[in-house]
Image (cartoon, rainbow, N blue to C red):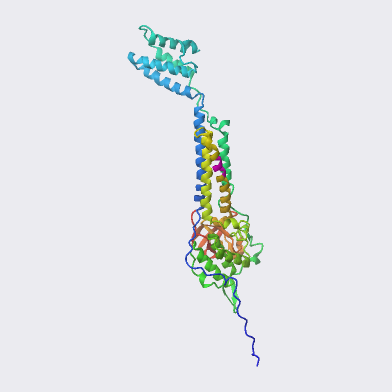
Amino acid sequence: APPAYDPAPPPIASEAARLPVLRGIGAARVPMPRSTWRGLLAAPILALLLLWAGLATQRALAGDPEAAARRAHARLRRTLAALAAAEDAGRRALLRAWQRDAGVRLKVDHAAPTAAMLGEPAWARLWEEADRHLYGAAAPLPPDWPARANAALAEVGAPPPFDPRRIVAARNLYPAMLCVALVVGGFLPPAAGAVGPGPHFDSRNDPKQMAPRETQQNGVWGLRPQPPEARLPPAANDWINHYNRGRAAAAARQWQRAAAHAGIAWVQQPRSEASMALWTLAARESGAGGRVAGGLPRPDDPAAGLIGLASARGWQELALLAMLLAAGGGGALLLVRFGHVPRRWGRVAGVATAVGGVGLAFTLTGVNSYGVAAAPDAAVTWRQVVLRPLPIDTPDGEARILLAPGTAGHMEASFLGWVRLELPDGRSGWLRREEIIPVWQPRPVGR
């Protein structure tokens, strides 16, 4: 006789269940804090600017037409002060020093000036009296000679001071433009690039979009259930832990939580095929918009191939190496330009600068592709939540910003179970600690 019932078909394994369960601990390398990262990136540029300023100042001082006159004027003042108190035996050396510096101060272009070359009657008379005392037969120096020499020096006055505008003269513009190019090229791609406003909006205009916090089960309203694996906080930088949690949530059809853990696992280890497959599946099922929508980057983003080459910390270190190469080549070009290094090294320095500049643009693009996730204080929302202006449970209808699942931001501060989250577009607010999942650190860290 035929059976009284139809046997149930064998269960079909879901796509998430076919993904492997990973074992071990996958400690990911945490990116540098934003302040440290930008400071290290700016240090070679600052060193290059200081090198240029030093070389340009040295050249300007060496080519200053009044530098020798200023030094001679200072020596004349010291010589006259010593001459007023010197004995007859020591006056001859002081008078010779006075004549040598007087020719320099009056800019007499002659190796052995005479009184007729000075052009000043007072100085010419002083010079003749000094010559008679030095080379005449027992010709004494007039007693008022030091006083008249001081008066003549005071009448001439001190030479003009050094003009700082000579540092940025036309002959020094080439190094200045090189430094400006490095500054602009190094900072145009930001370290943790901002994107446009994410999927959040004014909840007062559309209160029906609020996600319910409760769900009906067996006719009884209760709290939304969470899987057992969500009760324990994951290790923030253990990508295997995030992957396994995301896989378990995907197997339970909790796609929003699965997408949050899977996205974090892929960001921490983008070269893992398992994490890429899980994040692709969870992002498709949950509708995660990716970095363009204010969340984590997705494997199908245009820059996914670039992201997968290295982690955020790896891109940061490569960017620093490229910056050092570009700055080192630029410094060598400055030394060649100012004549401190042979010109034959100019081509090598130019190639190093070009390679470093191209590598810097490429690596900064890799860092920027991670967006908010390239900072250790990054966190992502795993469900739809409201961003409150204060760390208190105000009614949901009074909150102005509603965050979609998967929105990423920076953890700025914490207070009694609340976390202040700063969005990529600059807006910030408070939400509960259990409403976000940190990407790298379990609590807010320095900027």
Front-lying residue, 203 or 148: 148
Is residue 292 shown above or below 217? above
Residue 169 in view (yes/no): no
> Which secondary structure type mostly characterizes the magenta part of the structure?
helix
* Callout count: 0
Is residue 119 shown above or below 320? above
Which residue is located at x 53 percent, y 32 percent?
Answer: 167
Outermost residue, right side: 205
Residue 28 in view (yes/no): yes
Q: Quadrant of the N terminus?
A: bottom right
Horizontal and vertical percent for residue 137?
Answer: 36, 6
Q: Which residues are the magenta region?
A: 349-354
Front-lying residue, 158 or 37: 37
Outermost residue, top side: 137
Outermost residue, bottom side: 1
Outermost residue, front side: 344
Horizontal and vertical percent for residue 165?
Answer: 55, 30
